[in-house]
Image (cartoon, rainbow, N blue to C red):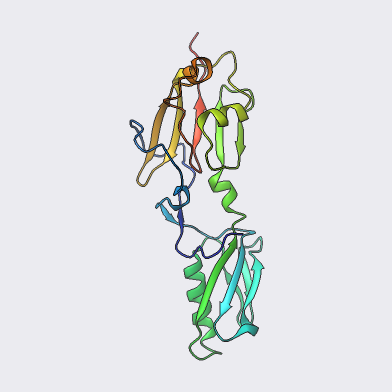
Amino acid sequence: MIRAFLGLSFGFLLSACSNQSTIAPTDMGDTDQSFSMTVSEYLIGVDDQLEVNVWRNPELSVAMPVRPDGKISVPLIGDIQAGGRTPVAVANEIQKELSIYVRNPNVTVILTELRNFEYISRIRVTGAVQTPTSFSYRQGMTVLDAVLEAGGVTEFAAPNRAKLYRQGKKETEVYDIQLGGILNQGELSTNFRLKPGDIITVPERFF
């Protein structure tokens, strides 16, 4: 379980129409801070597990998953929209609504299980690989690990034109991967450590 995520931010999956800039890899090492990419605050999603705590009012404190309609039910005030909002925003609304019934309520909303986050953090491998795939990020994973997860490249691949796409703070960062060297010569200079949300593409060769 993951607790106390009130200020935590994550990098979101890049869009094909995002602005791109090809840059030399500079910080592709340890990923201890992979989960604190400062793009925007994490937004609550369907099935995320929440705890609503009202200080000194345990009878009003509840734990529940976010319903498919994006809402949660809170004692006294009923349904509150949680999906697509930050925990702080949800806590502020609950606190405002409860102030009608409770004197100076102090409300916190805690994400205890990020089920929706799985899709934000997944690694994708597309293009000329045996099995284009999407799978959960695991710390320490490298480009080679991801390509092997996809079954390796096809006979039509141009592995040395492979690229890694990563959502940066302002735009999509693009890294060149010498995948042929990694697979065939053990050349690991571009066997980058991956981060949540990374996308690897392997194009087909020109005939």
Quarter occupied by residue 46 = bottom right
Q: Position of residue 181 (x, y in %)?
A: 47, 17
Residue at (60%, 27%) from the top-left corner? 148
Q: Single out the residue that lies furthest toward the top.
A: 207
Q: Position of residue 61 (x, y in %)?
A: 62, 79
Is residue 117 visible in the rendered structure shown here? yes
Number of marks in picture: 0
Please say if 180 is above or below 63: above
Quarter occupied by residue 110 = bottom right
User: Which quarter shows the N terminus?
Assistant: bottom right
Residue at (57%, 52%) from the top-left corner? 117
Please say if 75 is above or below 173: below
Is residue 76 visible in the rendered structure shown here? no
Q: Position of residue 81 (x, y in %)?
A: 57, 68
Residue at (52%, 39%) from the top-left corner? 140
Please say if 59 is above or below 177: below
Q: Position of residue 106 (x, y in %)?
A: 50, 82
Position of 69 with respect to 91 (left or right) is: right
Given residues 118 and 14, the one toward you in this image is 118
